[in-house]
Amino acid sequence: QVHLAESGGGLVQAGGSLRLSCAASGITFSSCSMGWFRQAPGKERKFVAAISWSGRHTGYSDSAKGRFTISRDNAKNTVYLEMNSLKPEDTAVYFCAAVAARYDIVAVPPTKYDYWGQGTRVTVSS
């Protein structure tokens, strides 16, 4: 059974940092592209960042570029999202997602992903 467990969310002041983690089980993690998405209240789920199974390739939304860094540790079956210079508009529930990938590529659209975690809430106060 596939399980993705996010952690690391919380309340932080604007300008602060958080590091989200997503621990995966029940999948061959090293063969999966991984992604982070977020959903603000009343809004649709949006792409934040993605990483290929080797970690060599990454992709970011415009809002995440320069502030967020996605990384992974295949030995620990974990993907991370380092978030710096946080803004109130970053407030959302953050989800990690996984998809078995034939090639070492990033996947952006949420429809590409097969497995999702339950999310971790991030609140940025002004």
Image (cartoon, grey):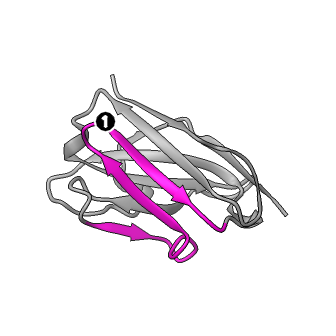
Is residue 43 within the magenta segment?
Answer: no
Q: In this view, does 99 lie to the left or right of 35?
A: left
Residue drawn 39% across and 64% down? Answer: 108
Secondary structure type for disc 1? loop
Report if residue 73 lies within the magenta region: yes
Whether residue 57 is situated above or below residue 34 in the rendered picture: below
Percent x, y for residue 106? 30, 63
- In this rendering, the count of numbered labels is 1
| Residue indicated by mark 1 | 76
Q: In the current view of this chain or complex, which residue is farthest to the left? A: 102
Which of the pair 90/113 is nearer the observer? 90
The residue depicted at 50 percent of the width and 75 percent of the height is 65
Crowding at mark 1 (Cα within 10 Å: few <14, some 14-19, many 20+): few
**Which residue is at 26% across, 39% downward?**
29
Identify the image quadrant of residue 104: bottom left
- Amino acid type for the residue under numbered disc 1: Lys
Q: Give the range drawn in magenta.
A: 57-85
Q: Quadrant of the N terminus?
A: top left
Q: In the rendering, at what x and y percent does residue 54 appear?
A: 20, 55
Residue drawn where x is 14% and y is 53% of the image: 102
Residue 68 rendering spot, x and y as whole percentages: 52, 65
Q: Is 89 left or right of 38, judged from the image as shown?
A: right
Q: In the figure, 107 relative to 74: above or below?
A: below
Q: Residue furthest right?
A: 126
Examine the image and state in which quarter residue 16 appears: bottom right
Determine the residue located farthest toward the front in the rendered image. Answer: 16
In the rendered structure, the answer to whether residue 63 lies left or right of residue 70 reads right
Quadrant of the rendering where the C terminus is positioned: bottom right
The image position of residue 123, as x and y in percent, is: 74, 51
